Image (spheres, helix red, strand yellow):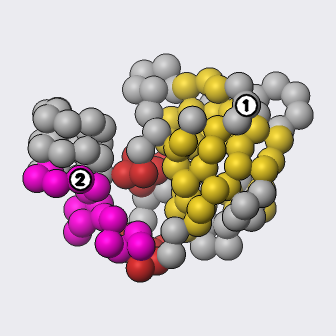
């Protein structure tokens, strides 16, 4: 499964150092917000967990989820795995081209941090959502 991950500028997250092109495996139990490797199903949703005033304050990557997966119960937007590959780290220029001024990806969205098209409200994923 392809997903997305946000990092600090130095490609660390929760004290763990990542590197583009490498695969990482967590040994032992893993769970949302406690242990393992976290990701979001859509790039815009990473902003809910890595909020920033300027989009380029963070780094973002496309990741491949290779291991077992556990999803956040309420929204299923955020997941956790025991094995992840950092496929591609986006450049700042790529991120600025992907997100609009309201941190939306897609077209004709109103609100903030939406992915997909024609969404109104905040943090919607998919097309033609409101709320």
Quick check: can you spot residue 35? no
Per the image, the residue denoted by label 2 is 106
Q: Which mark is residue 88?
A: none
Q: In which quarter of the image is residue 76?
A: top left
Secondary element under disc 2, as helix, strand or loop, is: loop
- Name the residue tied to disc 1: 67
Image location of residue 130, percent across then percent down: 13, 33
Figure quadrant of the C terminus: top left
Q: Quadrant of the N terminus?
A: top right
Q: Which region is colored magenta?
A: 94-109
Residue at point 23%, 62% (across, down):
102
Q: How crowded is mark 2: few (under 14 residues within 10 Å), some or many (20 or more)?
A: some
Q: Does the magenta stretch include residue 77?
A: no
Q: Compare residues 28 and 105 and report the one nearer the observer.
A: 105
Is residue 121 found left or right of 21 in the rendered image? Answer: left
Q: Where is residue 110 in the image (x, y as percent from the top left)?
A: 12, 51
Residue 65 can be seen in this image:
yes
Residue at (64, 26) in percent of width and height: 69
Q: In this view, does 76 lie to the left or right of 131?
A: right
Q: Position of residue 126 (x, y in %)?
A: 27, 36
Seen at 52% across and 49% down, the residue is 4
Q: Distance between the residues labelled 1 and 2?
A: 29 Å
């Amino acid at each position: 499964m392809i997903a997305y991950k946000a990092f600090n500028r130095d490609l660390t997250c929760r004290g763990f150092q990542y590197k583009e092109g490498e695969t990482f495996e967590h040994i032992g139990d893993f769970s949302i917000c406690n242990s393992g490797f976290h990701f979001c199903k859509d790039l815009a949703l990473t902003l809910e967990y890595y909020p920033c005033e300027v989009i380029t304050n963070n780094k973002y990557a496309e990741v491949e989820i290779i291991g077992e997966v556990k999803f956040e119960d309420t929204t299923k937007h955020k997941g956790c795995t025991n094995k992840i590959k950092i496929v591609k780290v986006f450049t700042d220029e790529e991120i600025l081209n992907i997100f609009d001024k309201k941190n939306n990806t897609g077209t004709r969205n109103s609100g903030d941090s939406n992915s997909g098209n024609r969404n109104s409200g905040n943090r919607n994923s998919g097309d033609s959502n409101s709320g």
